[in-house]
Amino acid sequence: MCGIVGAIAQRNVAKILLEGLSRLEYRGYDSSGVAINNEVGVRAHRAVGKVQALKDKFEATPLDGKIGIAHTRWATHGKPTENNAHPHFSGDDLAIVHNGIIENHDKLRNQLKTQGYVFKSETDTEVIVHLIHQELQSEPDFLQAVKNALKYLEGAFAIAVTLNDQNHRLVAARKGSPLVVGIGIEENFVASDQLALLHVTDQFVFLEEGDVVEVTRDGVTIFDSQDVIQERPVHVFNHNVDATDKGEFRHYMMKEIYEQPKVIAACLEGRISENKVLTDCFGADSSFLKNVENVHIVACGTSYHAGMVAKYWIEDLANLPCTVEVASEYRYRKVAVPKNTLFLTLSQSGETADTLAALRKAKELDYLTSLAICNVPSSTLVRESALTLLTNAGAEIGVASTKAFTTQLTALLITAIAIASEKGALSAIKEAELVNSMHSLPAHIDEALKQDVAIKKVSERFANKHNALFLGRGPMFPIALEGALKLKEISYIHAEAYPAGELKHGPLALVDEDMPIISIVPHNSMLDKLKSNLQEVAARGGELYVFADKDAELQNAEGVIFTEVLKVDEILEPIVHVVPLQLLSYHVAVVKGTDVDQPRNLAKSVTVE
Ligand code: AGP
């Protein structure tokens, strides 16, 4: 999704901004631009496609200056063209970059047109810069003019604005879209994501809803939504390794798949002892664990799939009703909240607009409390939730979520066991057994990764496929959904997933010799039922890709390509057996030559509806 970088320094900021944009590439975008403010005015370069195209423009025609703003755009209003790329201007001296969506842009555009403003783009962003320009006609102070203009806007935004005047400063603001301030030595920055600024600082201030900030070389002044100056804490970025480094791997996605043993260990650390879950991992007040009578999980995409797995665990271990819903649906419907329901959100980024809106709605309703399972400690979701369990996966750069998913599952299993134990639904012996299994998770994932070479070989058979069907049963059904999502996201192969028992109720009609059917068949209680479903496919000439453990007693046969997966305790199967599917989609994408880390049309952090 769109990314913002802004800088004010004593040195030329062009390189800082371009490097910042490169670091934001992982979020997904289709064009980019930079505006540099210097003694001759504000000048910009914009380019469609990769940030490299913008860098080439800077190479050919350098722009130097000590103040600048930059942007990667993910098209919402208007096609990904150079004209629609940010920064947008009003006159020659005022430029803006913007993330989010201005919902009343049509009305504002019409009003501005009647006042003589001429629009050069189809974007909603251009209305903001003209509004600021209009305010500047009666309000000479740039900061105040921006504040005045913001009052007209409905929707979500993070903006950074520069004006070529005597006061050297940047003005930025957020409402509904994230924005951080980076603090340097006699230079300061703004960005939509702290990763964009790690090459220049590790000190960050996270802006809150409604904040407007004035950034100069020497300081930062933050005004809250009531226009009162606020001091906000400075956070020091504490990742040991810069996540934007791919290391020995060709793609971030592969690096992140291989990081899973390490980050799952980090997710478990301090949350489980030798034989029990340490309930203080939910914070000082973990009384909700005893009082909860229902759980409602809300999330999007991959995080939603993690929630679907958790439903099986919570109902099975804690014997409590658990419902799971996509956030974009929850936020717009009338909901009935059963007594003592825990509202649980899942999000890798903690900035997903629909999930945040769902949380805000839930806070108005009668839930027991809200718990966020999230990977980004500084995110809006974490800040706005009553309770948090961090997944500790480290920054995830690949758009296709991998390590964020398996750490979400790990955190969810911790939560399910904690609830079950506190509710008295789990004996101490059973809890010890489960926790013991969890200790071996990192080693199991390490083992699962050893199938990489075999899976790469299988992936070659998908080079010319256009469709695929994933099957699973029980908690492996959401894993089938996740496998299908991974394949479509990065290889652009149309893929669907079904609970295997649903096959004969419709999808069986699709099965022929061209349709690969991928099935994860761990040796669990559903094995025999799943085997009969596979027979139904084989009988219709479908090509079967079966991932099963030794005990499932399946093997290569005509039309059956068998890949052995590790035998693990049933409760861990969803976490361990999603790994072969991640590897499969990765290798298929490489075979097909797609952009693995930044698939077309997708964004890492979906900060608009
Ligand atoms: C995962 O591969 C996807 N890119 C996407 O479905 C993602 O999980 C979804 O947008 C939710 O994001 P979140 O976890 O950051 O809220």
Image (tube, rainbow, N blue to C red):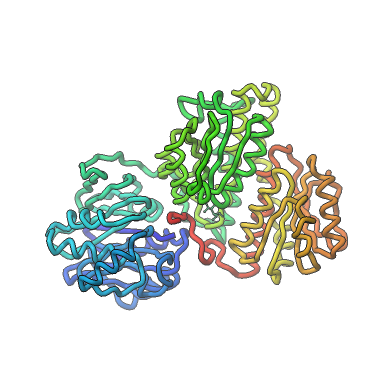
Q: Nearer the viewer, residue 570 or 274?
A: 570
Image quadrant occupied by the N terminus: bottom left
Please say whether residue 587 is visible from this viewpoint: yes
Position of residue 338 in the picture relative to residue 209 (left or right)? right
Above/below status of 398 relative to 57: above
Query: Foreground: 271 or 541?
Result: 541
Instruction: State the residue lying farthest toward the bottom.
Output: 60
Q: Quick one: 71 or 314, which is closer to the camera?
A: 314
Q: Is residue 238 above or below residue 156?
A: above
Q: Is residue 425 left or right of residue 539?
A: left
Can residue 392 be seen at all in this image of the molecule?
no
Q: Is residue 285 left or right of residue 403?
A: left
The residue at 19%/70% (across/down) is 41
Q: Quadrant of residue 410?
A: top right
Residue 517 locus on image (x, y percent): 76, 60
Q: Position of residue 209 (x, y in %)?
A: 33, 46
- Reply above or below: 478 against 92: above
Q: Quadrant of residue 165?
A: bottom left
